[in-house]
Image (cartoon, helix red, strand yellow):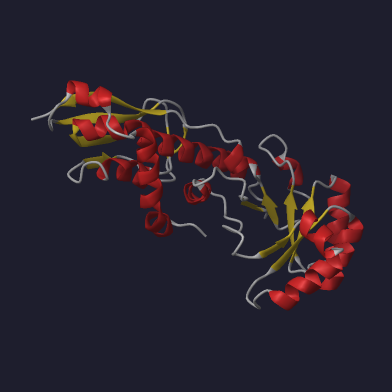
Amino acid sequence: MIDEVTMKIHADKLIRSALAEDVTNEDVSTNSVLRTRKDGEAELLCKQDGVIAGLAVFARAFEILDAQIRIEFFVKDGDAVKKGQRLAVVRGDMRAILTGERTALNFLQRMSGIATYTREMSRLLEGSGLKLVDTRKTTPNMRIFEKYAVRMGGGGNHRFNLSDAVLLKDNHIGAAGGVRQAIALAKEYAPFTAKIEVETETLQMVRDAVEAGADIIMLDNMTDEQMKEAVKLIGKRATVEISGNVTKENVSRLKDIGADVVSCGALTHSAPILDVSLKNLHPIE
């Protein structure tokens, strides 16, 4: 599970990499108008309703460039925000503010967009008992930020990477020669602490997974009728996960299936950004 502490431990190298992408030699625009340090301040403004996430990452992008920078936040991660709301004031070397602006905003907009989309989907599942989680369908090198944003929106995290758990998907099953064979091989090899999840596409695969002792059974791209029948077949002998083309537009139909978890790649691969901007930069004494 990705929390703020975990994110901070791993964030610096990723933020530095993003800054380096934007500045290979110098920020020629900023250096053209500011030859030496000059302190100033700018306002972080919200341009649409949503959920904010990534404030610590936003701040760190500036702190790397100016150790003396100070940011006063008026909201915290996970808060609902409104169009026109003043979210923060950034104070420090205006060269650092100008150079770090786009990188800081890119992180904040992306993470806040994911948190917003997740909050909307979570509300559609309220009262159902279904837990909404993300997937590994994340932007390369952004996974830790995107999975943190899902949590800020009220969702949960699936496995973080391939080392976390055994998830036998269609190609693993094909390589092993079938569901039963794949589970048997996984039980023989994987640590006893690792749960074994199997992706199933047919009711026969569900039967095989149950009888072979899978801990979690994923129902992938099944019809509602197939999923309800699968839940009956499993009969509480494994955790039931629904997956496959789940979006904000269709997630409500899953509330009465009887599953435990719904995983949704759209949380991270299809969420639009939340529009925020840094405005009104001016010198201060």
- Tell whether 112 sits left or right of 230: left
- Tell whether 134 sits left or right of 232: left
User: Which residue is painted at 84% across and 72% down in the image?
Assistant: 212
Residue 258 seen in the figure: no
User: Which residue is painted at 59% across and 64% down in the image?
Assistant: 163
Residue 236 image point, x, y percent = 78, 67
Name the quadrant of the C terminus: top left
Depth check: 231 or 203 in front? 203
User: Which residue is painted at 12% across and 30% down in the image?
Assistant: 36
User: Which residue is painted at 31% across and 45% down in the image?
Assistant: 60
Residue 248 image point, x, y percent = 66, 37
Picture quadrant where residue 122 is located: top right
Depth check: 75 or 165 in front? 165
Residue 262 image point, x, y percent = 69, 51
Residue 113 seen in the figure: yes
Outermost residue, right side: 204
Picture quadrant where residue 139 is located: top right
Outermost residue, left side: 285
Q: In this view, does 84 lie above or below 162?
A: above
Depth check: 207 or 76 in front? 207
- Tell whether 191 sits left or right of 239: left
Q: Is residue 84 above or below residue 197?
A: above
Picture quadrant where residue 258 is located: bottom right
Residue 251 image point, x, y percent = 70, 41
